């Protein structure tokens, strides 16, 4: 039988013939293949595409490894592919430890499967309108360059609000396990599953990540980091420090530089060690960075005049541009002062030792010598880089007591040669200040005193002394002199600026003052003296607390700027911060600028710094606001903790704020702020009337206004959040119902507690 001939199977697709390569593909060909062929799953598939065999396998594999190492391609669970490119406009995060002079950033959102996050150079020059700082989140325009491997650079478009890195809260153990009490008042409590508690104990401050559980998407917390226990450590400030991400631990490199710093010598300095400069500070001050001296001017042409000297610790001699000390000081921006601790801008070796003007110890300083006329106005001034020796360390109370006729063993010998001339010079300066007319908004500031366990021991308002005013006036004069000198030398500088109130805030103030029958001129062009006239009328009318609160709210916030638009509150055309370089980075920049402009040394402001002053100003203005918020939050928490044991107690207070949601009440005894919800006010529906800063009953006309004296009962205290809730016991004043359409129809309805008396 004849054999049946074999036939080819034509039912399936014809297998393509693989190429056989005689050389390696180019990098561009590799990337093109990865971009166009979705079925490439790994290096083996890619090798088949290009017919890589034999001796080419090893160099081909090395080529792929090189591309992967450069971040150009990435290996995922599913495939080998080209790394995703950044969009033309991208949100970037600048690391907190980035070099301010050579910024880099990374994409804020990045899928780890796309490989390592690309590093992006941030381009900042003298023409940049937006200058980010370490730790900022920015919106930026991206340029990838023309190379195969993207060389990303970014031009900042806007600094964005950066979300906090984690949820922060206090762990509370209960019968069902544990719960997290958030430090943010806007967040709700969350359960912590037993297995997610980690090493946290009751009362610990922790960082957590939040997961949504079940069909109802209930948030649950898992502890990722135990920060500490504020109660056992006696440091309530820990909450604000970590919640607001305030740098508080110095890196080893910073400590090392501080420890290695050597004391400045007389080289390149004038010898002023025989001039009896003295420091006047709070009794508990640990560093002393300013000293003062005054004498009668012996120039016959300036009869009745004075020579006032202000010497400031020469921090610029120790904290040089580009060093680890400098980068950390810039990152912090300023020192942060809490009732239970200080987070300093500089290590103690610098702030409390080398730059502290200790009594009887030679110290480097930058001094300004000011010649004043008999009327207190400055005639001339000059700056000097000196070596000084403080003749005495006094407290404000000591100095004031001596002037008031009660000298002690230390101040007695200083009275005639040092203290009397100082006060005589201040008396002349006070005349010039009053004639200048700065904003006279002297609001009392309470001081919280703690016991050994970090709990509130006492709250008091420190007495305001002429000794305080003397130092303040001399520091202001020195700051003005610094700004004037740098302007005259056409030097770049950081101004301390305070803009005049906006037209919207002025109109709101006019509306409110109109309800009190206080006259205000209608022009939008106002001066600080105009506000002083308003405050004077309020004192006579007996409603100074109400008016002071509204005048304060009408003011803009002071900040730092490379451009000058004056200081409205001080009524000064030019102003800079020069007098506290230990605790403010702005002052350190001004010191460096003076050193450079006056040729006082080689450690002055660099060209690189000078081109970035706008960005530096933005950054340190932000760190200052952060510090103020942290200090306020910590005080609120301490006061809430202090009052938590007095639930149900009655307190006298004042209405310190009025909103649609209710009334804010400030207690007279402690200065603590709490809230009365609008729904609990009384037997009516209350409408918020912003032009009167009042809540007014729709039917009764009962009115609660900013500044009203009231009595409240404490219902709830939340120490972790720093929140207090009150019940209002006082009745409002009688008045007319608000005009306009009523918000509620029908009979009056009680929204308040049964304890409120019906009318």
Image (spheres, rainbow, N blue to C red):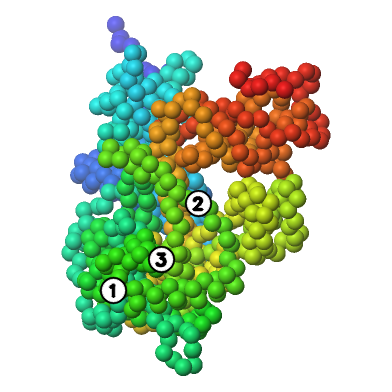
Residue 322 drawn at (x, y percent): 31, 65
Above or below, comparing residue 712 to residue 195 in the picture: below
What element does badge 3 sit on? loop
Report which residue position mark 1 lands on. Answer: 413
Reading the chain from its start, which is encountered first: label 2 or label 1?
A: 1
Residue in view at x 21 percent, y 71 percent: 361
- Residue count near mark 3 (Cα–Cα under 10 Å), binned few <14, some 14–19, many ≥20: few
For the residue pair 77 and 524, the one nearer the viewer reads as 524
Reading the chain from its start, which is encountered first: label 2 or label 3?
A: 3
The answer for how far apart the CA atoms under marks 1 and 3 are is 15 Å
The nearer-to-camera label among 2 and 1 is 1
Residue in view at x 46 percent, y 93 percent: 300
Tell me whether the residue at label 2 lies in contact with that at label 3, contact meaning CB atoms closer than 8 angstroms. Answer: no
Residue 33 drawn at (x, y percent): 40, 41
Specify whether 565 is left or right of 77. right
| Residue extending furthest toward the right | 740
Above or below, comparing residue 376 to residue 684 in the picture: below
Report which residue position mark 2 lands on. Answer: 444
Q: Quadrant of the N terminus?
A: top left
For the residue pair 35 and 251, the one nearer the viewer reads as 251
What element does badge 2 sit on? loop
For the residue pair 249 and 29, the one nearer the viewer reads as 249
Residue in view at x 49 percent, y 46 percent: 161
- Residue count near mark 1 (Cα–Cα under 10 Å), binned few <14, some 14–19, many ≥20: few
The dot on residue 174 is none
């Amino acid at each position: 039988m004849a054999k049946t001939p074999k036939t080819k199977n034509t039912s399936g697709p014809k297998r393509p013939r693989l190429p056989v390569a005689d050389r390696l593909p180019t990098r561009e060909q590799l990337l093109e293949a990865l971009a166009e062929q979705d079925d490439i799953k790994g290096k083996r598939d890619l090798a088949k595409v290009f017919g890589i065999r034999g001796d080419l396998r090893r160099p081909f594999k090395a080529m792929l490894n090189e591309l992967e190492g450069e971040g150009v391609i990435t290996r995922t669970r599913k495939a080998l592919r080209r790394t995703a490119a950044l969009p033309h406009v991208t949100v970037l995060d600048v690391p907190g430890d980035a070099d301010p002079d050579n910024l880099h950033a990374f994409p804020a959102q990045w899928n780890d499967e796309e490989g390592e996050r690309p590093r992006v150079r941030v381009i900042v020059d003298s023409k940049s309108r937006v200058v980010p700082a370490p730790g900022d989140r920015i919106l930026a325009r991206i340029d990838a360059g023309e190379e195969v491997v993207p060389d990303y650079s970014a031009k900042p478009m806007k600094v964005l609000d950066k979300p906090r890195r984690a949820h922060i809260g206090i762990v509370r153990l209960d019968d069902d396990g544990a719960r997290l009490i958030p430090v943010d008042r806007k967040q709700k409590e969350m359960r912590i599953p037993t297995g997610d508690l980690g090493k946290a104990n009751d009362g610990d401050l922790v960082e957590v990540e939040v997961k949504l559980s079940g069909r109802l998407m209930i948030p649950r917390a898992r502890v990722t980091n135990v920060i500490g226990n504020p109660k056992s450590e006696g440091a309530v400030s820990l909450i604000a420090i970590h919640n607001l991400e305030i740098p508080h631990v110095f890196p080893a490199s910073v400590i090392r530089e501080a420890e290695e710093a050597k004391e400045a010598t007389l080289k390149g300095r004038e010898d002023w060690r025989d001039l009896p400069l003295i420091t006047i500070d709070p009794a508990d001050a640990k560093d002393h960075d300013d000293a003062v001296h005054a004498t009668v001017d012996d120039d016959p042409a300036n009869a009745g005049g004075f020579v006032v000297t202000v010497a400031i610790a020469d921090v610029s001699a120790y904290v040089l541009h580009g060093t680890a000390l400098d980068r950390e000081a810039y990152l912090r921006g300023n020192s942060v002062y809490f009732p239970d601790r200080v987070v300093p801008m500089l290590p103690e070796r610098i702030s409390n030792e080398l730059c502290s003007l200790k009594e009887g110890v030679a110290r480097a300083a930058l001094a300004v010598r000011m010649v004043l006329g008999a009327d207190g106005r400055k005639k001339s001034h000059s700056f000097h880089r000196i070596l000084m020796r403080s003749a005495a360390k006094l407290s404000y109370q000591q100095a004031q007591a001596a002037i008031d006729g009660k000298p002690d063993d230390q101040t007695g010998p200083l009275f005639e040669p040092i203290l009397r001339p100082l006060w005589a010079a201040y008396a002349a300066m006070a005349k010039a200040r009053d004639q200048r007319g700065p904003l006279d908004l002297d609001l009392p500031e309470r001081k919280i005193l703690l016991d050994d366990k970090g709990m509130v021991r006492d709250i008091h308002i420190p007495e305001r002394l002429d000794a305080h005013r003397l130092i303040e006036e001399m520091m202001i004069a020195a700051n003005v002199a610094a700004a004037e000198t740098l302007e005259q030398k056409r030097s770049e500088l950081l101004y301390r600026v305070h803009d005049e109130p906006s037209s919207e805030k002025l109109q709101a103030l006019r509306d409110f003052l109109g309800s009190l029958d206080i006259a205000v001129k209608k022009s939008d062009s106002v001066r600080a003296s105009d506000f002083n006239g308003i405050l004077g009328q309020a004192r006579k009318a007996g409603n100074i607390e109400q008016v002071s609160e509204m005048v304060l709210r009408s003011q803009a916030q002071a900040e730092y700027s490379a451009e000058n638009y004056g200081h409205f509150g001080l009524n000064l055309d030019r102003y800079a911060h020069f007098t506290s370089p230990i605790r403010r980075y702005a002052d350190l920049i001004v010191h460096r600028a003076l050193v450079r402009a006056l040729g006082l040394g080689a450690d002055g402001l660099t060209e690189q710094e000078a081109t970035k002053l706008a960005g530096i100003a933005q950054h340190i203005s932000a760190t200052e606001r952060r510090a103020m918020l942290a200090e306020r939050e910590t005080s609120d928490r301490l006061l809430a903790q202090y009052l938590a044991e007095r639930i149900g107690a009655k307190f006298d207070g004042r209405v310190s704020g009025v909103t649609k949601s209710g009334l804010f009440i400030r207690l007279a005894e402690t200065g603590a702020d709490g809230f009365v919800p609008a729904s609990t006010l009384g037997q009516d529906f209350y409408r918020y009337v912003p032009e009167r800063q009042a809540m007014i009953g729709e039917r009764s006309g009962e009115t609660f206004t900013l500044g009203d004296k009231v009595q409240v009962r404490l219902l709830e205290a939340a120490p972790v959040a720093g929140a207090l809730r009150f019940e209002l016991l006082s009745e409002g004043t009688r008045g007319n119902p608000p005009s306009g359409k009523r918000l509620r129809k029908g009979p009056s309805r009680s929204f308040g507690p049964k304890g409120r008396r019906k009318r």
